[in-house]
Amino acid sequence: MVVDIPQERGLSSLDYKYLDGIEVCRFPLFNFLEPLPLDWMYVVYVIMWLGALGIMLGCFYRLSCLMFLCPYWYVFFLDKTTWNNHSYLYGLIGFQLSLLNANRYWSIDGLRDSKKRNTHVPLWNYTLLRAQVFIVYFIAGIKKLDSDWVQGYSMSYLSHHWLFDPFKLILTEEMTSLFIVHGGGLILDLTAGYLLFFDATRPVAMVFVSYFHCMNSQLFSIGMFPYVMLATSPLFCYPDWPRRLLQKFPAFLRTALPPVEPPQPSEVCIYAGADEVPKGKGKTTVRVKPEKKLSLRQKMGAVFTVLYILEQLFLPYSHFITQGYNNWTNGLYGYSWDMMVHSRSHQHVKITYKDGLTGEVGYLNPGVFAPSRRWKDHADMLKQYATCLNRLLPSYNVTKPEIYFDIWVSINDRFQQRLFDPRVDIVKANWSPFKATPWLMPLLVDLSPWRSKFQEIENTLDNQTELVFIADFPGLHLENFVSEDLGNTSVQVLKGEVAVEILEKKENFTLREGEKMQLPAGEYHKVHTVSKEPSCYMYVYVNTTDVALEQNLTKLSELKERVQNGTETEPIPVELQPVLNGTADGVNVTDPVVRAFLRRQRKMEEIQRRRNFTVVDRFARFSFKKYYIFRRSFLMTTIALRNLVLGRPPLEQLAQEVAYADMKFNSGPEKGENVLAEPSHSEL
């Protein structure tokens, strides 16, 4: 967490998220939670980071756990949009550590107190951590028994990654996705906890889970989670494994390493009335005085361990209690260990407001005032967003606004369909965490078999033709605009009956299963579902502008290749000579095709340059990125603390200080790149 707090917890970008004075909608778990002023948020993060550092060093351990735990859960509850399973896991482990004796070996507390130095730790401490890791694996495996995962629809795109290239030497891409990505992930999650638990299978399990987490570190942007899970694997080994390993080091290094002597007895441990206690797999034993009676603390530790494990087994299946958080998937994402089981794509999001006084109707840019996009998939966040818009819009001359959402989502490659009822004013709509959301539209699971037909239909078309598969409910309609860039756009009914309304021409056409019609470009139309059952239809279109651009880019690429190898016999236009000769830097290019060509060339050159990176270059690039994250975290924290102690300086000075914190030097393998990717505060 010392490394994670500046990165995934967001210390390095805290000012972008909690900048004072901006109008923004937030999504806390409890509506009464509010972020502190920006400078004080830095204080919260500093306390959390110092707590993590204290836990790592075993320095004032209980206090450090408290310093980490309180700010962490405050920040966690402050923003549901950042929730994920591993962030939840970090909080759980932090809670466990606050109860465990994790400062009994090679800790600063051990140097300060001989009673804590190199002493036994109760077995329930290990049991708690091992059980937590086991639950992470096993419940994730249970969740992957979902039919979408078993059939290979959840992560169908993942097999395109270069990490799976070795498997594609003997398997097709589809088989790699089904058997390696989905089948392998299912088997590993279901069995990893068991295999790690037993001595005979532990070495094999360590190899496979290590390979799995190393792959995840490259496949997903999930911060320190793969490395945390790598670090949890040794918890299943005998507790004395570090001592046995350290004993193999030369004697002259022993003074700089943790002690290898047998640990001393602890008053919080139970020794089962034996005079000699075996120490793990090694031969070392120690004589202790038998315990005659269990203390209240020991009894409470045993009871807590059992209750905690039961609670963790129950919580991922407690969605029948918190029904308000259920959508097409159960519960808030982030505490059910249903990792990567559901993938979503959003085709269409429309926010409509209506002035409650004048009746005027208008539209909002999706995501306005919202720093995250996750609100689109969760009823509780949608309610919070609508309430926030209802509070903010009156300052923009919208009185008593009503807010309507029309959100189209495809989950695991199904039809695009509505998630929420677009006819309901969400500001006035009822929502409770303990009751089912009445304005949630049901997932049309009966149409799931159509997914196999989608691929068959796509295989009959050329690469330039695009398809969008739509399913809609009776009595509703989809309003759409066909851009003039889209030539030969048509709608074809796959199931049910629809009425297509051309708004400008005021024409209506009824289409039944198998029928299709051409849609005019540059005009709005509505597709009404008039059948008693949900309708299914698809848009078929070609982006003629993109096709023409691609053809021109191909011609330019071929021309450049002929110029470079000396086979071009025709004279080259003067305006194209710098482009084809590679001397276009600094030249003002006005032709959009040529500009697109140059952008593509630079991108291809950059990709090739990165592919040619040596191991040293890659490590340097990685190091520079981390350096700038930690550098900005330190500088911005220093500025915030200075502001609290001495007061804020003039705005010009503050802007210069922030600019210095944002500064990135052109050195190393990143030289020449635009490394200032973050937006400025003025852009926010």
Image (spheres, rainbow, N blue to C red):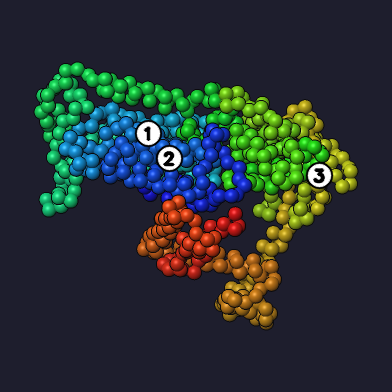
- The correct choice, above or below, for 304 with respect to 203 in the image is above
Which amino acid lies under the numbered mark 2 shown in the image of this protein?
A: Pro
Q: Classify mark 3: helix, strand or loop.
A: strand
Which amino acid lies under the numbered mark 3 shown in the image of this protein?
A: His
Answer left or right for 503 relative to 236.
right
Residue at mark 2 to residue at mark 3: CA–CA distance: 51 Å
Residue at mark 1 to residue at mark 3: CA–CA distance: 55 Å
Which amino acid lies under the numbered mark 1 shown in the image of this protein?
A: Phe
Judging depth in this view, the residue of 244 and 335 nearest the camera is 335
The residue tagged 3 is 525
**Looking at the image, which residue is at 78% across and 31% down?**
475
Q: Classify mark 2: helix, strand or loop.
A: helix
Judging depth in this view, the residue of 611 and 495 nearest the camera is 611
**Looking at the image, which residue is at 43% across and 57% down?**
635
Quarter holding the N terminus is: top left
Using a 10 Å C-alpha cutoff, classify the residue at mark 2 as few (fewer than 14 neighbours), some (14 to 19) or many (20 or more). Answer: many
Q: Quadrant of residue 451?
A: top right
Residue 676 visible in the displayed image? no
Q: Which mark is residue 95?
A: 1
Judging depth in this view, the residue of 338 and 357 nearest the camera is 357
Q: Which mark is residue 71?
A: 2
Residue 528 visible in the displayed image? yes
Answer left or right for 538 relative to 24.
right
Residue 530 horizontal/vertical position (percent)? 80, 31
Mark 1 or mark 3, earlier in chain:
1
Mark 1 or mark 2, whichever is nearer to me = 2
Q: Tell whether label 2 touches label 1 (CB within 8 Å).
A: no
**Looking at the image, which residue is at 71% across and 37% down?**
403
Q: Classify mark 1: helix, strand or loop.
A: helix
Residue 599 horizontal/vertical position (percent)? 60, 66
Residue 24 horizontal/vertical position (percent)? 61, 45
